[in-house]
Amino acid sequence: MAKAELKSKTKTEIEDSSSLKGTLASVFFVGFFIIVLWIGVYFLYLDRF
Amino acid sequence: MIKSPLKSKVDPRDGKLAMAHLYVAFIALLVGGLAGLLQVLVRSGKFQLPAGIGYYQILTVHGVVLGLVLTTFFIMGFQLSVVSKTAGTFTDKQRTVGWIGFWIMTIGTIAAAVMILLNKASVLYTFYAPLQAHFIFYLGLTLVVVGSWTVGAAIIMKYAEWRRANPGQQSPLLTFMALVNTLMWIVATIGVAATVLIQLLPWSLGWVDTVNVAVSRTLFWYFGHPLVYFWLLPAYMVWYAIIPKIIGGKIFSDSLARMSFILFLLFSIPVGFHHQLLEPGIDAAWKFLQVVLTFAVVIPSLMTAFSLFASFETFGRSKGAKGLFGWLKKLPWGDARFTVPFIGMVAFIPAGAGGIVNASHQMNQVIHNTIWVTGHFHLTVATAVVLTFFGAAFWLVPHLTGRKLTKKMNKLALIQGSLWAIGMTFMSGAMHAAGLLGAPRRSAFSDYGGSAQAAEWIPYQIAQAVGGSILFIAIILMLYIFINLAFFAPKGEQEFPVGEALHPEEKAPMVFENWKLWLGITVLLILFAYTIPFIDLIQNAPPGSKGFKLW
Amino acid sequence: MHVHKYEKIWLIFGITTLIVFLSVVGVSAFYAGNQPPSCLTVIDPEKVDTTAPFNEPGLKKVEGKDWDYELVFVAQAFAYTPGDVEVPLGAKVKVIATSKDVIHGFEVAGTNINMMVEPGYISEHITTFDKTGEYLILCNEYCGAGHHMMMSKIKVVE
């Protein structure tokens, strides 16, 4: 039991040390910012004559 | 590997040439920054220019001196430095070519500046015909461009020499990037050189009576958009290849960095129509085609965003960072060489998003020539690019002058970057907001005959004045730091940081160095995007325009 | 060349977003006719005053066209003719403008009417004035010392 726990902990650490999940989250934040701004101005365009 | 060309220090002779460029760049920062301060004060409605100085004369100074002089001189100095550092010291012949280019650019700058100060050229930095400046103004700008080609020639010669000495090897990343930017610049400036030499100079000299306005604008914008990428790519060089070293990490991917630069070479130029979307003389379908190509040039920036975050995250995790964003805490926030360019990177998020809006075909009607656009490029060039240049100057200047960035200067530099961020948030934020309400760019203060709409813009104009004043303080601080690093900082060895790839064994394909291929595709894309609409403009041209001097 | 899985996801997401943007504006432009002003008609800039429709600037009712009115403006440094104009609410109007001298802008603040006015070319934009109010017309392209004084007004009235 203790052995298994140790093993799984090492595994998470290896995953954690090479993971790029923060990068993925960051670029998606950038992506959503682009989308929100674009849609905002597009609706302004639609609303105006 | 035959031999490592990476020298620990840029040769002092090359350093002198690079520093000559930086001196001019920082003088331009002072002059242009002062002009900018006067503009925001005038536009607040609370201040009038003394001694009959015209707002548009000041605006011309601001645009020419910061948009063309500061950027071009800094970029040339920076690129000479990175090439000398990564591809080896310039030969005497190459360095002489560099000096000739520097002096041609400087003489051209002085000539254009004198004409602006004499109020003979208050035509703004875009100098749209048929407003007609003194011929010496056009001649001066021509010399700046020709000089930049000459400096570029030194870089191309060095690259060619390196390739001959290292057959079958990929060139050093920073040299490769400097070369891409130089090639793009040369292809792009052909447009502005053509309109100035073929159209505007003979017309301002009185050799011809009229000018084809739409052709001149089209040639200008053929140059005008790659111009902004010419500003941006050196910032990307710092972000991709230098910042990873400063933080103690690695370049996420050498190959992807090269690929994004190749994409910039291909797609930066055939996109000028997105500055001309509301013009009567160009067919809407051709405009849309260039809109599509403009969206293609977004892709390498998407790649860049990923690479930068990945480089930061990989570094943070190697230092034991946990969780989704724990790596952010591991970054060296106390180091101005990192933090000031980082503020620039953050600014590029709203800057890029705004750029996509601007280029979205008919949506351009919402913001065209409003002060939103001014807010946009004060985030791109005047924050993302300029703060990155400042961040580079913090180590480049002392490296070249044999001095050291002291703790005190580093602290001042951090304050400088923070002031810039605060000032620009006010100024650019207010510009974006007022622009959406319709406030125009490039206009002196006006209440438009008591218009209720124009009255709504005034609070935003006051916010711009507050932001602009904070920015001016940041400029003064930057000049103080520059002078310290150039002349007064203690003698010592300041590191020239050059990043190494995370996986150095993974070599970029050699096809990236095949310039016949890439320049060939670049030319094909330009011909595809421009040939037919350009022939249309000439074949269906209206009677030409005489020159006007309306300032 | 190795590309990380997450980078692939990001690029697919980003490029899809760009394609969606392009499709939205493309369909709006080519199917619904919401193109940016691209009239392609030329005129002699020195004969604007004697060339129709610029010999009679102002609002004019028209018959048998897709629009109800034509609203003609002449731009010159530093004024527009007419200096102000009333448009009935709900009118579908073709706004037509040209310049007698340098490049000007023609922006009706707070609306999508925004076009470059260049000597030698006619600029047009068709729209339905569906909101009442007083709208400022201003020059948004630098044209000289009096650029910021160059204005006109549109009153949309019931």
Image: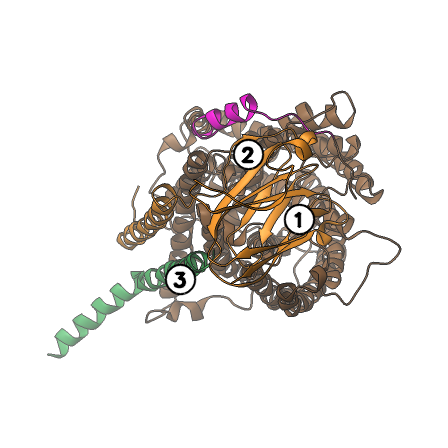
- In the image, the chain rendered in green is A
The chain ID associated with circle 1 is C
- SS for callout 1: loop
Please rate how many residues cluster around mark 1, counting C-alpha atoms within 10 Å: few if below 14, some from 14 to 19, many from 20: some
- Which element carries disc 2, helix, strand or loop? helix
Quadrant housing residue B543: top right
Task: Give the vertical position of B499 relative to C41 (above or below).
Answer: below
The disc placed on residue A36 is 3
Which residue does the numbered mark 2 point to in the structure image?
Answer: B222
- Real-space CA distance between mark 2 and mark 1, rounded to the nearest whole angstrom: 35 Å
Q: Position of residue A44 (x, y in %)?
A: 45, 60
Identify the secondary structure beneath mark 3: helix
Q: Which residues are magenta?
A: B525-546
**Residue B218, can we see it?**
yes
Q: Amino acid at mark 1?
A: Pro
Q: Is residue C112 above or below residue B1?
A: below
**Prevailing SS of the magenta stretch:** helix
Q: Residue B387 — which label?
A: none
The residue beneath circle 1 is C82
Which chain is home to disc 2?
A: B
Where is residue B105? Give x, y as percent. 72, 35
For the image, the number of numbered tags is: 3
Chain letter for mark 3, please.
A
Amino acid tagged 2: Tyr
- Does residue B5 appear anywhere in the picture? no
Q: Which chain is brown?
A: B
Residue B457 located within the stretch drawn in magenta: no
Instruction: Tell us which disc is closer to us: 1 or 3.
Output: 1
What letter labels the chain drawn in orange? Answer: C
Q: Are the residues tagged 1 and 3 within 8 Å (C-beta)?
A: no
